[in-house]
Amino acid sequence: MALLFAMIKRKMVIGAMLLCFAHVIHALEWSYVLPAKTSDPVILQGLSVSDTESVLSHEKLQVFVGTREDCCDGKWPLAGQYALSKGALTFTPDFDFVAEQPYVIRSLLRDAANGRSQPHLTDFVIPSARVVRNAAVSAVFPSGRLLPENTLRFYLHFTESM
Amino acid sequence: MNFFKLVINISLVIAYFLTTAIKAHAIEADIKFAGALTFSPDGMLFVGDNINGAIYAFDLPAKKRTAGVNAVKIDNIDSRIANLLGVGSEAIEINDLAVHPLSHDIYISVSRIGNHVSRPALLRVDQQNQVQLVDLSSLSFTRQSLANFPEQHTTFKARGLMGAPPTPKDLAKGEIKLSSLAIMDMEFYNGELFVAGVAYDNFLSTLRRLPFPFNGEQSITKVETYHIAHDQYETRAPIRAMSVQMIGGKAQLVAAYTCSPLVLIPLDKLKNGAKIAAHTIGDIGNGQPVDMIPYTFKEQTMLFVTNNSRSPQVIPVSGLHNAKAVSDKDFARGPKLDLGDVLPFGPVGEMVMFEGVSLHMDLLSDKYFVSVTRDIPSGSLNLDSNFTFFPNRVHNLVAEYDFPQYYSSKAK
């Protein structure tokens, strides 16, 4: 975690995000392994025997386009294949995930606190492999401290192509 | 003798690898683009691949539906498909639609763009309005490469409106490859697949004739057309929509081009290597035809011709018998505008009301057309069904019948 905070502090946002996605998100007794690459699956692990028996795979784990704020009325889950093995449910979409596209996972799992099944929503975005550098203003012209009152144009120079 | 056997064996191996018709059962189709679709009467789905330059025939056996065929309606069909494919609706393109002749399931071909790559997808909409992605790898298929397929580099020439400088939209059109027109429409007739498009280095409008099952044979005929609205003989712009009909006692292709000449082409003229002149018999008027769907109306065979620039045209096939073929000698020279004296010309039937714009259409049953329609008020893209006898969904308009007073006054 120290590395993660250090990266965020140094604005190495992409690296920090990658670290997040490589990380297993823990919640209750089950957890996700989120995809780090567009070809990776979503894995829901730590399922109890009751979870694996009580609900069909496609109801237990669904992935939608969008974010949790707009999920999931009127939306349809991604088409893909399910595999259940040793308490882990793996969802592999028929088409690779798309980098920079927001997705939300909806899982229907038994809550350890009250024993009832309820939906859980988790967002994820797979960052583009392309390095994205933030643009900054590197120069402003005219560069003097005082400008004529009738200045009609000025120039901004950016560190990145616009 | 052994030497001759060896030569024969080597020849057989070479012939096997060179043949353009490939049959595959277990291997996955290497299809790169799912474009134009059409079915054979027994449920073979033909898919045009404009990138590979090939036609794929997927075997989709089905039992004939004995129950009645229901109207299908799915609003925002593009969003629904995009959801399944894991992208936003702006990242898909619906390329065509065709109805299985036995199950009446609707098949939709799509391009899905993600991670800077376009991939083909085929979706099935069933009678319960359920949309499913078809697993192409599970289907047996055959593949026929197309000879003289256009190269993949030349693009349209960007042009502005009436000589004006091209706008950004015009420039974007100028980046579209001509090979995107290589497989415009397909028609299965009497054991053969007819394919319209451009060929020969993007130069000539062409009709291909492929026997099915594919055996590597194909004939290619160059087609020239006298274009009434443009007042010129055209060899490049391909047929947009077509249907084979019995006219004058023989099988003829009825075809529509952009801006929108209607022509007849006798099938017996379609011979390999020939260059023929289509018989121009009419012109619907300026616009771009999309689909030509034969159906029965009052016991007559009609052609329902959709157009992305005007309302659909309903053409009685009976009116095409004895139609006169015309040339530039039959008109005053010069382009013809819609408000001039000439257009519409010939036995092109009647324009009918259609609410919205149909981007793709097929016959769902004797009773319904099914259409991917751009809705005008909302801009949404909907899959909807339209009665064949009255295909307009008139209730979507605001008319006298929408006023409550209309009914209260009737009740008095």
Image (cartoon, grey):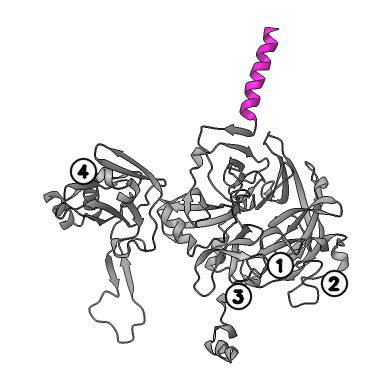
Q: Which residue is mark 2?
A: B332
Q: Which residue is mark 1?
A: B313
Left or right of B27: which side holds B243?
Answer: right
Find out whether the residues at labels 3 and 4 contact each other: C-beta distance under 8 Å.
Answer: no
- Distance from Cα at disc 2 to Cα at disc 1: 25 Å
The dot on residue B126 is none
Chain of the residue under the numbered disc 2 shown in the image: B
Q: Which residue is mark 4?
A: A48
> Callout 1: 10 Å neighbours few (<14), some, many (20+)?
many
Circle 2: element type: loop
Earlier residue among tags 3 and 1: 1
The region drawn magenta spans: B1-20
Residue A24 at least partly seen: no
- Distance from Cα at disc 3 to Cα at disc 4: 55 Å
Find out whether the residues at labels 3 and 1 contact each other: C-beta distance under 8 Å.
Answer: no
Could you tell me which residue is drawn at 29 percent across and 65 percent down?
A69
Q: Amino acid at mark 4?
A: Ser
The dot on residue B394 is 3
